[in-house]
Image (cartoon, grey):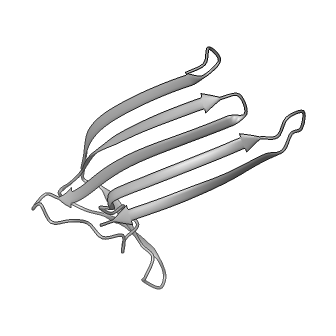
Amino acid sequence: MAEQDTLNLALTGFKTQIENYQAYDRHSTPNYLHNLDGDVTSQGVEASVNWMLKQLDTRLSYSYVDMEDENGDPLGDSMAIGASVGNTWVWDTQYQLVDTDVSLGYTLLGWKG
């Protein structure tokens, strides 16, 4: 790595528990917001590697998110609460053109539920 290059590593784990949550039923007419009993748990991990050198910035990241109700059943997104998304990989690359405000980039998303 050259002196002006930067390498960043990040790792985050999380677990969030929501009690007596609300859910928006977007399939009903009229639409309703429901107050629901029980708990929802969202847990997972995020990891990323970011390398920056001169005008190039590239990042590879991975995330895993699991959302369950109090019975351990996975949540779907039918009531706009959130959903388990499984394994997600993202590769994002940006290149800043010299002496301009223009950058070119590409994002590649890979997912396996």
Residue at the limit of the structure toward the left, as seen here:
71
Image quarter in which the C terminus is found: bottom left
Query: Residue 95: horizontal and vertical position, in percent?
Result: 72, 42
Left or right position of 68 against 98:
left
Q: Quadrant of residue 40?
A: bottom left
- The residue lying at 64 percent from left, 28 percent from top is 53
Left or right position of 5 against 80:
right
Image quarter in which the N terminus is found: top right
Left or right position of 99 against 18:
right
* Viewer-nearest residue: 12 or 53: 53
Residue at the limit of the structure toward the right, as seen here:
99
Query: Residue 3: horizontal and vertical position, in percent?
Result: 62, 14
Residue 90, placed above or below residue 26: above
Query: Residue 72: horizontal and vertical position, in percent?
Result: 11, 60
Q: Quadrant of residue 6?
A: top right
Query: Residue 66: horizontal and vertical position, in percent?
Result: 25, 55
Residue at the limit of the structure toward the bottom, as seen here:
29
- The residue lying at 30 percent from left, 70 percent from top is 76
Residue 11, placed above or below residue 68: above
